[in-house]
Amino acid sequence: MVLVMAIVAAGGTAAYYQWGSGDGDSPSGSASAELTVRYRNDAPATGATAKPWLEVINNSKKSVALTDVTLRYYFTANDAAAYGANCVQTSLRCSNVTQKIGALAGSAPKADHYLQIGFTEGAGSLKPGGTTEAIGLQLYRLDHKALDQSDDRSFDAGVTHYAPSKLVTAYLRGALAWGEEPGSRTGGQDPAAPTPVAAAPEGVLFDDFHYSGPADPALASNGWRVRTDGGGPGIRGTWSAANVSFPAATGGKDSGDRAEQALQLRVTSDGTKGGTKQAELQRAEPDFFTGTVAARVYFSDKPTSGRNGDHINESFFTISSIGKSEKQSYSELDYEYMPNGGWGAPGPRLDTTSWRSGKQGDRTTRTQKLSLKGWHTMMITAADGNVTYSVDGRKLFTHGGKYFPRERMGIHFSAWLVDLPFKGKRTWDMKVDWLYCKAGQAVSLAEAEKAAAGFSGAGTNYVNTLPKS
């Protein structure tokens, strides 16, 4: 028996077929296979992103914990480029699907690397005959050049509807349970038995910024929006999606053999409004209220190219929506770093400000005269009636009273220019390695960095278990 189901995927609705429990059904084509992997292709051989969709079926007569299952999708890394991956859509929730890029120990036809997919405890288990249903994945080069999948072992341009594929392997507690490995099983190609990864705790938001670009469907699925509207601050009407990117990370953290990326916010200008582009990435919904929000941020003291001297503002902040009603609550917590100063004050300086309303002066603020060139862990804690701003564990400003948050806020990263003091082309870059939030609870620097490293090391690129209200 076969059930036809539909999945709404990026770019349209895709039908796939789910194996039922009718007599004589054999999705694997092999009575001895414990698992079957079914594959569907959703991208041309040449393009910016590979888009394999996979499904795992339990053929055994016992329940299988998905933490015991790993999959490998094999490809050729052209030009020895670094690769990234993410999850776009699955009924298991993408936060329960891990992705890691690995290199084969020996060469094999059409394969020298693989995308390894694993599962956390939150993915649950498969009962006999059960299926994960569709798992939508993306694979891309970190230099964002086009992929050529024609020489990738697991790629098949003709498989546009789900079909068993033995060119994708599945392992159960480290033992091959489906598929055909490239080359021999010698030379260290076998994966070790997977280490169970715990489900994400409640009240957490984490993002490692593994995206192919500002148009990546996973970016919107994970609750982000690239700003392109008008308005301030800075040079009004110059917000550009093209200035938001996700290049390979350097210096953010010790990633070992794991490919890392960072959010990059670029400001470009020739000294005119028409020649200026600013950048901002923001949460589409206000999902942070009280607790801790932390981010590993790279601040620039000098432009990447061109003349120095701009009054640039590199910002990390939380802000609620500004409504039409004067009675509506409002909250805003800001970091604004200005290496060259601004508004008549010299730099480098860091302003930490908490707002009660959008009205000028309705705030409490503290200015720190210091350089933040390079990577730093920025934290804002709002707990027990107090707001604390800290950098690398050093407390800079604490206050209580009426400027404590009154409603939920969205998280924003932004780079913009206060003014245009001179003509000539220049480029500034601000970067963010990761974001971590814990709702309703103050956490230490060590706790935040340990949590972020744990998610990243497990291959969990995004988690959101924050309360909805």
Image: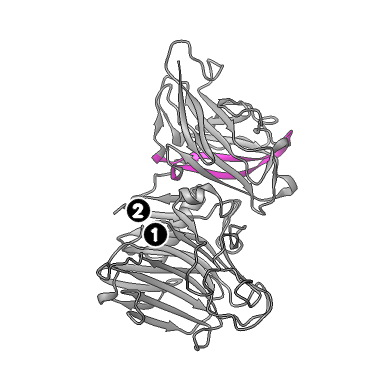
Q: Which mark is residue 5?
A: none
Crowding near the residue tagged with mark 1, few <14, some 14–19, many ≥20 C-alpha atoms within 10 Å: many
Q: How many marks?
A: 2
Q: Which mark is residue 437?
A: 1
Q: Secondary structure at mark 1?
A: strand
Q: Residue furthest top?
A: 24
Residue drawn at the location 57% of the way across and 30% of the way down = 39
Q: Is residue 149 above or below residue 185?
A: below
Residue 353 in the image, given as x and y percentages of width and height: 38, 77
Q: Which residues are magenta?
A: 95-122
The picture quadrant where one finds residue 276 is bottom right
Which quarter of the figure is the N terminus placed in?
top left
Q: Secondary structure at mark 2?
A: loop
Residue 324 in the image, given as x and y percentages of width and height: 31, 67
Residue 400 in the image, given as x and y percentages of width and height: 27, 76
Q: Are marks 2 and 1 in contact (CB under 8 Å)?
A: yes
Does the stretch in magenta take in 108?
Answer: yes
Residue type at the position of mark 2: Leu
Could you tell which of marks 2 and 1 lies nearer the N-terminus?
A: 1
Q: Which residue is mark 2?
A: 466
